[in-house]
Image: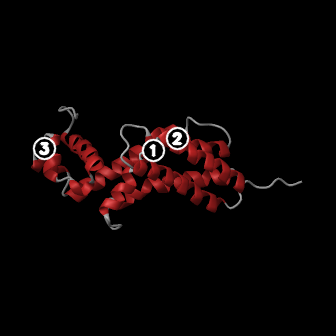
Amino acid sequence: MIPRKAEPRERILTTATTLFYQKGIRNVGVDEIVAKSNVAKTTLYHHFASKDELITEVMRRRSEQWQQWLFQALEQHHGSPKERLIAIFNVLGQWLVIHEFHGCPFSTAAAQLGDIQHPAYEFCVEPRQILFAHISHLAQEADLCNPESFVQQMMLLIGGAIFTVNMEGTSALTTVEYARQAAIALLSVHEQPELN
């Protein structure tokens, strides 16, 4: 429930965020958002010139909030760069069990938009770019062989875990544990050989 005391713009954004995630961006109309936000349609259009502008702001804010959450969660894990690379799967497990997981909101939104020119699209891919950059930084710090290949393979493990949980309904923590074990094996393959 959205508190009636919340500002109209905030109520609209909160409602749209929930509905877009639960039902899909293209399945939610302005009238439903207006009704569930307890605002007039003119109020919605006062704050957002169009549904596309609302979608863009929802995804921009969602990306920003996710990034804040991600880095706060990652800060809880210390150790060597290699240990922090593996700890990413602990954080992934936390994310997948927060609330009701209906799939990655960013990849889902990108697929529903179906248009890389849509202004919201950049915020759909931004979280992946942020995570890619973080893993790349740690891979460089860990002095891995072929860090570019390692990063791409890690991203596939992460994406595969998210997809498996979403499509197969398997336990998030079990799936992430399998991905974590695969990452440990992957890391050993990319470690620099010690010089004798």
176 or 187: nearer the viewer: 176
* Disc 2, SS: helix
13 or 48: nearer the viewer: 13
Q: Earlier in the sequence, mark 3 or mark 1?
A: 3
Residue type at mark 1: give it: Thr
Question: Disc 3 versus disc 1: distance between alpha carbons?
Answer: 35 Å
Instruction: Check if mark 1's residue and mark 2's residue have beta carbons within 8 Å.
Output: yes
140 is higher (above) or lower (below) than 176? below
**Number of numbered discs present?**
3
Side of 1 relative to 159 (left or right):
left
| Residue ID at (11%, 49%) | 41
| Residue ID at (17%, 33%) | 4
Label ID, residue 35: 3
Say whether residue 96 is visible: yes
Q: Which residue is mark 1?
A: 170
Q: Which residue is mark 2?
A: 174
| Residue ID at (37%, 50%) | 105
